[in-house]
Amino acid sequence: MNLILDTHTAIWFVTDSYQLPKSVKKHVENPDNHCFISIATLWEMGIKHSLGKLKLKAELKKIFELFLESGFILLPITPEHILTNTTLPFHHRDPFDRLIIAQAKREGFSLISKDQEFQNYNINLIWDLE
């Protein structure tokens, strides 16, 4: 299965956070799944970190390296993703989340996020709680 990880999911996975449910972690660790993170995730992290809204226990560059070391595949932003984004209703206003949703829709990926607002976009949302 192809999975795209929301920003918090990717961060919590590479930092081994208690906030990531074990059942969700199993989806990411499943060797049959391909895990993608959007370039929008890196962009969002860079902006929030520079504004002091994202506190990390390691340098931003190190977190990016951990994403790649974890086997995550970087998903570029394409014109098709942007066009899909323009068709989304405004259930969610965050531009980074909207772009990740558009990528999931366009690519047919399941999306791993705790954000229940994403369910309003007719995508396969994964967030299993134990």
Image (spheres, helix red, strand yellow):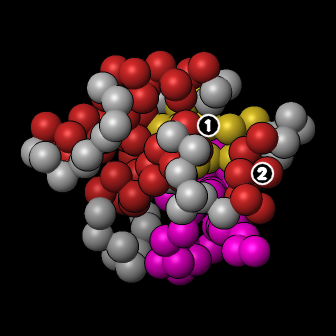
Q: Which residue is mark 1?
A: 36
Q: Can you see residue 99? A: yes
**Does residue 130 appear left or right of residue 102 in this picture?**
right
Residue 108 colored in magenta in the image: yes
Q: Residue at x 18, y 52 (%)?
A: 53
**Does residue 37 appear left or right of residue 83 in this picture?**
right
Q: Residue at x 71, y 51 (%)?
A: 25
Q: Residue at x 52, y 25 (%)?
A: 66
Residue 114, relative to residue 16: is it above or below? below
Which of the 4 image quadrants contains residue 30? top right
Residue 60: x and y in percent read 31, 28
Disc ID at residue 86: none
Residue 70, relative to residue 46: is it above or below? above
Q: Which residues are magenta?
A: 101-130
Which of the 4 image quadrants contains residue 49? top left
Q: Can you see residue 80? A: no
Residue 105: x and y in percent read 60, 56
Is the C terminus in the top left, top right, bottom left or bottom right quadrant? bottom right
Q: Residue at x 40, y 41 (%)?
A: 41
Q: Residues within 10 Å of mark 2 (few under 14, many from 20)?
A: some
Q: Residues within 10 Å of mark 1 (few under 14, many from 20)?
A: many
Q: Which residue is mark 2?
A: 27
Residue 99 colored in magenta in the image: no
User: In the image, what residue type sits under mark 2?
Assistant: His
